[in-house]
Amino acid sequence: MSTLLEVDGVSVSFDGFRAINNLSIQIGEPELRAVIGPNGAGKTTFMDIITGKTKPDEGRVTWGDRNISLLGMSESEIAMEGIGRKFQKPTVFEDQTVRENLAMALHNPRGPFAVLFYKKTQEGAKRIKEIATEIGLSDSLTRRAGELSHGQKQWLEIGMLLAQDPRLLLVDEPAAGMTTAERELTTDLLKRAAKTRAVVVVEHDMEFVRRLDCKVTVLHEGSVLAEGSLDHVTADQTVIDVYLGRQ
Amino acid sequence: MPRVLILLALLLGFSPAAQAQELQTLLQPHAQEVAKPGRRTVGTVLDDLASSGIPQVATFLEEWQDKSVWQSPEGLFFIADEDGDNLILTDIDSGVETTAPSDGFTQLKPNGGVRRVIGTALVQFQLMDPDLNRRTTAVASIARRPEASQLAPLLGSIDGEEDPTLKARKIQLANFLSASFAEEPTDRIAAISSLSTDVSVEARAVLNQILTTRPALAEELPTDVNVARVLNPGEDMSLDAAYELLVADDLAAPRTDADTIKAALASNIINGRVGDVPVAQLGTTANRNRAYAQLAHSGTVPPLVTDTDRDAALAKFTFFEIYDEADTAITDAATTALASVETRVAVGQSADLALDALSLASIYFLAAIGLAITFGVMGVINMAHGEFIMMGAYTGYVVQLFIPSYTASIIIALPLAFAVTFAAGVAMERLVIRHLYHRPLETLLATFGISIALQQLAKNIFGTQARPLTSPAWLDGAWVFNDVVQISYIRIAIFVLAVIFLFLILFVLKRTRLGLEVRAVTQNPGMAASMGINPDRINMLTFGLGSGIAGIAGVAIGLYAKVTSEMGADYIVQSFMTVVVGGVGNVWGTLAGASLIGFLQKGIEWLNPSNTLAAQTYMILFIILFIQFRPKGIVALKGRAAAD
Amino acid sequence: MNKSFLMRNPSTLWFLLGLSLFTIVVTILSDAGLGVMSTSFVKTLGKTLCLCLIAVAMDVVWGYCGILSLGHFAFFGIGGYAVGMWLMYARTEGIVLDSLATQTIPPTAQEVTDAIGNQIFGVVGSSEFPMIWAFSDSLFLQLLMVVLVPGLLALVFGWLAFRSRVTGVYLSILTQAMTLALSLYLFQNDSGLRGNNGLSGLQNIPGFENTPQSTISLAFFYASASAVALGYVLFAWVTSGKMGSVIKAIRDNESRVRFLGYHVESYKLFVFTITAVVAAIAGALYYPQAGIINPAEIAPIASIYLAVWVAIGGRGRLYGAVIGAAFVSLLSSWFTGGGAPAIPLGFYTIQWTDWWLVLLGLSFVAVTLYAPKGIGGLFDYLVRKPS
């Protein structure tokens, strides 16, 4: 397992409030990692920094075998480097069909002219079919995404991430609002995806994290509080204080 | 000059006893001189008249100068008007009118020289007249047409002047006259130097008058004239203009212009050719010149002065400007004084510009703050905001139709305009905007629909011509520092209004329950609602407040600009710019935006005064570029709140 | 843009069919056929087609890509000015050459230029040709200007605006500011484009002085119809397939598209520029039919009306834009031209010349509130009803 992403000593503040404070995390490839933490621990900001939405005040974010810096790259460049992100709220394009949603995410040239003269290919169609099967939407390819249920939208979004063929998947609270059955499917989906790539899951739900059965990083006040297996971190006194002691 | 001084002395010392005398009796011994006055002889008459102290003298002198005095066959003098064959005679003492046939009467026609002497004596009378208005008129007429001869009477009248304002004016004017006309150069230089602190237009005119120049030329630069500067043809003046000077002095042959060449060629066509050039080939300058040269060679036309000839002729001469004033010391003093005046004028102009910019910024602030509130709190762009401004202005107009007192009408119009536009804003929020939340672009378009409807409605009700909104008399006029720096009271009033509103809005937002709720709804509507705040009510009130302020801005703008149905449209884009440049959702941001745009617009107008359209164009371009570097405006929200 | 594309988009095919039918009907009714349709009405229809074309462009940039541009009428105007410069120059040159030909001596090139300059710029107290008229003697170069100037302006403006992530109402205001700046600039006498006089006499086409206006109007009508057809097919092609998918996605959630790896700014710039160019072409066809162009045509209000047409016709569907532009602009000229009967209320008579704008404004509010899909939404209703 080689290091894919290295976040080193990153800090960022908003109006004097330090959202991320000297944060350092390493993600390997392939790896499944869960990031947990109470509200305001900096989980979303952490993702914002990796995907280029927020520029940190200090620190380094290096990526890949060539150790390139992600700071200073735009969101789309970072996405093209192979980092996919799923947002907390499912954001699929509701006016378009499931097939169109997936086709847009397929790993193809992204320039406007390449897209304008894009021709549908056999392998593209095959790949869409594969992913649709993977996320359980193979019967819904021609449906408008807006008609899907909440859970299906979440899966479609994960499917869009898979279609991008990323090396690192950042997934923000995938289980929110899902039924128990849907959760099980989602965990399986993520675990399968993590066989060939790095997957980082931000989650509140301990049960869901337990099911993922992976290394867990606990964030608190913008830095890493503890790291290790779920049992290890839940036994940690500081973690217990953070989660329970503040009541 | 001495005679005038004597006259002056006599005038100052006239006694009441002398007034008992009659003018006619006084004139009779001098009848000969009065009837046929010469420049030399008229002096004695004027001296006697002046010393008499008779009040009718001034009128008599005016009429005399006007050629309206006639002499009767008996030798008596009358002021007379011709009426056909008759004369309407006015007794010079009693003013009684009679009519008599004009036979035997002779009109007195003093010549130009005499009239001038009379005029100077008259000035004397007018400057000393007991009536303040007549004295003021006399001083003003000297200021309009200053002459050397007026200096002494003016100086003489200063000591006796009782009115302090007029006295100061007389001293100033005497100073101007001394600078131009005093006999001793030292007096002139002293007067000129004293002008170096005077920024009035008059003082600058006096100095510029002293420094007038005319172009001249010579083979060598002369040493005996007062040369202002040497002119290099081609740099300080065009080569052709320099050559024109040579031609005017008969030092060179006139140039043949293109039209003359063409005419000469046209009248010398022989067998379809001019010289050896076929007519069809005369469509180029080179061929035309060649044909003309041939004509010139044969002596048919004067030779062509080519550019080379012109340059050679110019090379023989030096061109320069000489001062009309011969004394170097005086022109030097005037140059120094003028430079100092111009520095002061520049400083004054900057101050004036700053005041102008400040008042423009106040207007933009008033126009934009309502928009900023609704935009900032609700994220709603109200394209009808300009029409609310218009509505406020028309409210003011309608109030003035019913209330004749301008002061009272304005006092009533301000709150009424607020009420009217507040109600309009609330109605619009309830009927339209409430249904379009979270669709900002559609709100923009719907409010635009309201904007065109309101504009046309105003046109239908009030017509297309501008309606007056008259400000009270105490707001007329301007606060004048000097000729350069002044600001009209109405602009000061608008500035004061803007300041009041700045603090009022800050107070409402920061210190009242409503303000607290508004801020809560701005930051987190969901949370605010769960705390028992009704976001609908807050939005409605906010929108009403923003619209109400637009109404008040309308009254203010209507006071100094015309009230038309399109007045809102004139301010809407600037208001948007103000909000966007300043930063959304912040009163201070709007203030910063208004100041930036006001000062910028005035600054650009100052750099390019002839063209206010260009100023607006450049300002908008600047704003477009500004947005590139600060997309969130001057006062930007930071952090997660600004992320969406 | 092959046959299969049209086959896959039957609505485009229907549109082209309808447009052809319309062209044939107009030809039959015009002076070329039965002669029951006046030349000025043919011109009105030709102009309306140009407005439909710019409405289609507006629909792509707003309805599909979500950029509410209040600047596209400025591009329309620039196109008109660019072609107007050639029309005015060439026509004045003809007149000047005719009048100089009577002189005994042939004129020099400078004399001809001066005389043309005097004719064109005398009205703003000048006779010098400004720099921007450098290519006005060449039809080809001016036609190139029709495309290049608005294209470059849109490219530069769009690049500046999109790269600093100006979106939503901010962007609308910024485009409105651009339009205002341009129209204010053109209002100046020393803008080089005759200030508020604008360019006139554009209906006289140099080289066709002896052709009757009825023929010219029909020629321009055909040209406008062809332009609408081409523009419609072009935009139908752009908005279909993957490109359409991406730009609609940008409209709905810009940042999500960015995280998919698309460089959103390039797409917006592409759409903004290409629609600007089409808008300019529409303008270049419109103003020779209108005969005159002046800066008031470019005022921000015109671009807002454009948005109104598209909104009333129905955003996000190309035929909606065409219907909206044609419907509202024809209705508007019917009402303002005194065609609509006045309504006597006893105490007051509603004259539509006065009340049309009130009606338009309010119906616009109503459409935004109650029929966000516009007239085009009716089609959905009709099409879906059987199912």
Image: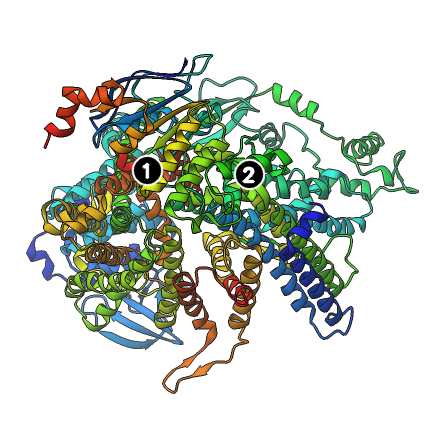
Quarter residue B180 falls in: top left
Q: CA distance from mark 1 to mark 2?
A: 24 Å
Which chain letter goes with mark 1?
A
Q: In the depicted view, which residue is nearer to us: C166 or C239?
A: C239
The residue wearing badge 1 is A175
Asked if the residues shown at circle 1 and circle 2 are in contact, with their CB atoms under 8 angstroms apart, the answer is no
B558 displayed left or right of C185 = left
- Give residue B482's mark: none
Image quadrant for the N terminus of chain A? top left
Quarter residue B134 falls in: bottom left
C42 over C95 or under it: above or below: below
The kind of secondary structure element at disc 1 is loop
Furthest toward the right, the residue is B271
Q: Amino acid at mark 2?
A: Lys
Residue B120 visible in the shown view: no
Q: In the depicted view, which residue is nearer to us: B299 or B165?
A: B165
Horizontal and vertical percent for residue A58? 30, 17
B20 displayed left or right of C370 = left
Q: In the depicted view, which residue is nearer to us: B261 or B618?
A: B618
Residue B20 visible in the shown view: yes
Q: Residue at x 11, y 48 (%)?
A: B163
C381 over C4 or under it: above or below: below
Mark 2, other Cα within 10 Å: few <14 / some 14–19 / many ≥20: some
Image quadrant for the C terminus of chain A? top left
Q: In the depicted view, which residue is nearer to us: B41 or B480?
A: B480
B544 over B289 or under it: above or below: below
Mark before the other along the chain sequence, 1 or 2:
2
Q: Residue at x 27, y 67 (%)?
A: B78
The kind of secondary structure element at disc 2 is helix
The residue wearing badge 2 is A129
